Amino acid sequence: MGAFIAPAIGRLVPDRVIGVHVNALVTFPTGDQADMAAMTEGDRRRFAAMNEWQQRSGAYMQIQGTRPQTIAHALTDSPAGLLAWIVEKFQSGPTRPPSCPRTRSTGTGSSPDVSIYWFTATAGSAAHTYYERFNDPAMWAPRERSEVPVARGRLHH
């Protein structure tokens, strides 16, 4: 979420922000032929990797973004389902926490995350944030370039 919020803060109050740092600078090609032609080879590789990720791993985001209430009931009704949902994302994600088990859950690796969602019954409201972003036309509208410097850093394992 910070990759969306931090740049927005820089645009809203540029006189109070000296710079923005994000770990995931979320930008997409416009689809305009000139923009696509201007992409470097590195840009093309990253664009292809993003498309492959969407095809192979984007279901998590798509389900929450299109059917949040369905997944809300499933995750709020079943602690085993919630555990499987969260552990699978941690295992397959690029920033797998060191405490997350690689092949099985011992009940300790992701218990803080699972506990927060389970005891507060907030899997549904978390899923709805995806739905709200998907269905907010302003979310994807072009914005003026910010005068606040923005930098992207990489997470190291």
Image (tube, grey):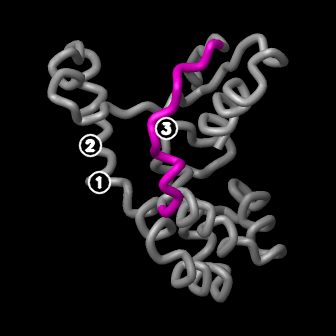
The reply to whether dot 1 and dot 3 touch (C-beta < 8 Å) is no
Label 3 belongs to which residue?
94
Q: Measuring from the top left, give residue 46's x and y in whole percent.
A: 30, 27
Q: CA distance from mark 2 to mark 1?
A: 9 Å
Q: Give the SS element for disc 1.
A: helix
Residue at 69 percent of width and 71 percent of height: 125
State the image quarter where residue 1 is shown.
top right
* Residue type at numbered disc 3: Pro
Residue 55's place in the image compared with 152, above or below, is: below
Per the image, label 3 sits on a secondary structure element best described as loop
Q: Is residue 5 left or right of residue 57?
A: right
Q: Earlier in the sequence, mark 2 or mark 3?
A: 2
Against 3, residue 150 (above or below) is above
Question: Local crowd at mark 2 within 10 Å, few (<14), some, or many (≥20)?
Answer: few
Q: Main secondary structure of the magenta part?
A: loop
Residue 51: image tag: 2
- The label number, if any, that marks residue 56 in the structure image: 1
At label 2, which amino acid type do we have?
A: Asn
Quarter holding residue 20: top right
Provide residue 114's location: percent of width, then percent of height.
72, 65
- Give the extent of the magenta segment: 135-147
Q: Nearer the viewer, mark 2 or mark 1?
A: 2
